[in-house]
Every structure is written in structure tokens, then in C-alpha cells.
Amino acid sequence: MGTIIEPFRIKMTEPLAITTQEQREKWLREAHFNIFLLSSDQITIDLLTDSGTGAMSTKQWGALMQGDETYAGSRSWYRFRDTVDQITGLKHIFPIHQGRAGERILSQIRLKSGDVVPNNGHFDTTRANIEWMGAQAVNLVIEEGKNFALDHPFKGNMDIPKLKRLIDDTGPEKIPFAMITITNNSYGGQPVSLENIRETKALLASHNIPLIIDSARFAENAFFIHKREKGQGKRSLLDIAREIFSYADGTIMSAKKDGLANIGGFFACNDDQLAEDFKNLLILTEGFPTYGGLAGRDLEVIAVGLLEALEMEYQIYRHATVEYMEKKFREMRYPLVRPVGGHAIYLDAQQLLPHIPPLDYPGVALVNEIYLEGGVRTVELGSVMFGNIDPKTREESPAPFELVRLTFPRRVYTQSHFDYIVDIMKNIWERRESIRGYRIVKQPPFLRHFSAHFEPVK
Ligand code: F0G
């Protein structure tokens, strides 16, 4: 095929900050070398996350004006509900203000100390909400998923024999629910196959353990199934999505990703009692169940966005962007997670910077270098985000990987923006051996990556 183009044209522009090297050095120092503490005026291209950072379509902006801000039973709620129902087929549907609100409520109503929640890969907020209840969050991705150099069409898959062993060893009564995350963000945005979801569900069902799908990037996952799974190439993405959700007892969706919205999400489930318990805590802490902490206009935007994310042309363009960047990075010989996932490129900072030990945070070193070089913000997924500190000894153990994620907002940047990033990365490659690590000088007890202060290692 020839050039794959962005299947949209630009109707409104937003200026980017063009900055100097001196400014960036000053700003990063003032932000205590933590890119989460930079402001957007200090950033040229922001690849921190694909969450809530997408551009809305004309259809979404039009829908936004239709927002019905009635407290209870608004028209926008019914439109939202009908769309979520069309995609998931789940019986009870609740809007939530974002994914972690659903994680918190589900954890609080179903988990207690000593419980275990398996997942192919918990996202950090999911893990934190589970651990907050004293339960244990276990990652059971297939072995291939942990080997970044290995090619496999569905590296996000759940390791079913391991799940079986966990259930046998723990006892199903201690597993109030199990999860599958599509795509598996914590392991490179890798997809999960339909077959794997089906088999996971069958195993869980035989022990009466409900399956909750974390569906933040369900449409990207559906596209991978369409492209890579045997017998799926002729199906529409909506059809595939419906089959995915047919195996779920419930789902938590952060609509900030494949909802193509800037805020929002939903929880949906089949079980009446679970819905009742969820609803009661939702009312107490988020809002009435027909808005769940969102404005009516947000519900409208999500209702349109969920279906736009399932449009084939959109997904073809989205994946072409990621593949374009993969090709460029491979030409530059950067070590990266292969094959590339759906929403990001993950660079292997440990392999790139072998002279920086894990607890000098090679991921943070690379992130900061990319910012200093060209004002591009990326994010560390390594020992700062996933490392462990022993509560008793205060001894720190590193994460099993040191990755840097270049996350692609949806429908926001053009090919020349990506070419600019490639130029920056070429310069960094040349001087990679002179890059130094960091140490933490201040950190909070949870989710430290958001607010820790760093200083360069001498
Ligand atoms: N699950 C997954 C797989 C996620 O990637 C995220 C968020 C959440 C749940 C939580 O949803 O942000 O709406 O509360 N991921 C973002 C990221 C923040 O950058 O990957 P949320």
C-alpha cells in the first residue's frame, strides 16, 4: 500500500511551545528533575500519556453541545448507556469520572486483606487500589510477554497454566475477581487474543471467579485481533469487541483512551448484587448513577468517541503511526519492546544505558535527556514507577525492567512532529554513553513517580 494518511484534516490549531536548551535546563531543575512537575508551556511535544490527551472530532464537538445537564435521567445518559450497551452487551452500566474511580469502588466493595487479584498486567493505579485494601495484585502475563526481544502476536496474553496454579494454591474463595487488561499497558501495550480471553473465562468460570476486563484500550486490542488472529480478518471491530465483552462478567473502562474523550469512563457488569453494591458507593462518593461524576456533555462525547475508536480507517492510521516510529527506532538501533503495541513505543533504557545501575534509574535518565534535547516529554516505566521498597528495612528493590514509554495521543500529532522526535533521538544516541543516572531526594509513600524529587548522580 502507498502512504497511509491521517484520515482527518485540521480545523483548529493549538500553538506548541518552542523552547531553548537553557530554558529547558532551568525548568527541569526547577521541576526537581521530575517531568511530571513540568507545565505544558514548557513542553513542545507531550508523549507522557495517551490518556485524556486525544483530539475530539467535529462529531464529538457537535455532540458536546447536545449535553443535557439534568441531574437524574438526562438524555445524554441514555445515549451513553445505549452505546456502551451496543458495544459491551453488559446488563448494568455506570458512568465513572475515570478508570481509577471504578478500580477504587470495585476494590472497596469486593476486596479484603489477604485476597488475591490476578491480572495479565495490573496498571499502576489498579495495583495501588487493590493493595490499598490489603489485597495482593498478581501479574500473570505469559513468559513471552516478559521477553522484550521476542516476537509473538499476542504478548499480552494471560498465562493460563499459571493462573490455574494460583487458583489451586490460593483457593478460589480468596480471589473475589480476576482481571484481564486489554491491551496490556504495563507490558508494552501488547494485545490479548480472543482465544486467550475465552480460555481464561472458562477457567475462571469453573471456579466461580468473575472476570473483570480492564478495557481502556479495547478498540486497539480489537484491531490487533482483526489483524493477527486466525479467522478474524473479515470481522468488524465492533463485532470483535462484542465478542470480547461477551466473556466478561464486568468491565472497567477509562474512556480517556479508546473513548477518545478527555475525561470519563464506565463500569459495567451482569451480576445484580455487584451492580447494587457498586451503585451505592458510586452515589456516596462520585455522583448519581446517571452521571457518575461526569457532566452530561462528557457522556455525549464518550458515546460518539467509543464508536469512532472502532472505525477501521482510524485504527489503520493509528497503528501506521506506531509502526512508522518503530521502523525509525530500529533504523537508529534503539533497543525496544517488540513487536510494538497499540499506543506507544517502549524503549529499553537498561539496554541503552548499561552503565547506569537500575537504582540510579536509567529510565528517568533517558526521559530527562529526551526533554533536555528537544522539549519532548516521555515517561519512565521502571524502578521508580514499579520498584519496591521494603516497609520494614526501607531497602529498595528494582523493577524487572527499565522502560521509557513514548505514548501517542490520539489524532493530535502529525508525521513531521514524529520526524522531529526522531531527530532528537539521533542526537541522544550519539552521546548515550555520557548520560548519567539520578537519585531520589524526596518521595511520597504511594505512586512516587508522580511527585518524587530527583537529583543527578555525581
Ligand atoms: N487501566 C489501564 C490499562 C490504564 O492504562 C489506565 C491509565 C487506567 C486503568 C486508569 O485509568 O487514568 O482513567 O484513572 N493509564 C494512563 C496511562 C494514566 O498513562 O497509561 P484512569
Image (cartoon, rainbow, N blue to C red):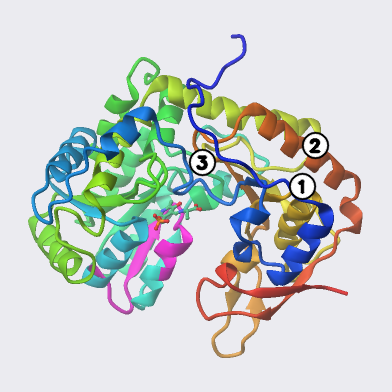
Residue at position x 17%, y 38% from top? Answer: 79
Q: Disc number at residue 190? A: 3
* Secondary structure of the residue carrying numbered label 1: helix
- Do labels 2 and 3 touch, CB within 8 Å? no
Q: Amino acid at mark 2?
A: Asp
Q: Quadrant of residue 226?
A: top left
Q: Which residue is mark 2?
A: 423
For the N terminus, give its image quadrant.
top right
**Counting residues from the N terminus, which is met first, the one under dot 2 or under dot 3?**
3
Along the horizontal axis of the image, is 430 left or right of 397? right
User: Marks 2 and 3, Cα distance to the nearest angstrom?
Assistant: 26 Å
Relative vertical location of residue 18 with respect to residue 127 in this rendering, above or below: above
Which of the pair 382/420 is nearer the observer? 420
Q: Is residue 252 visible?
A: no
Q: Which residue is mark 1?
A: 374
Question: How packed is label 3: few (under 14 Cα within 10 Å), some, or many (20 or more)?
Answer: many
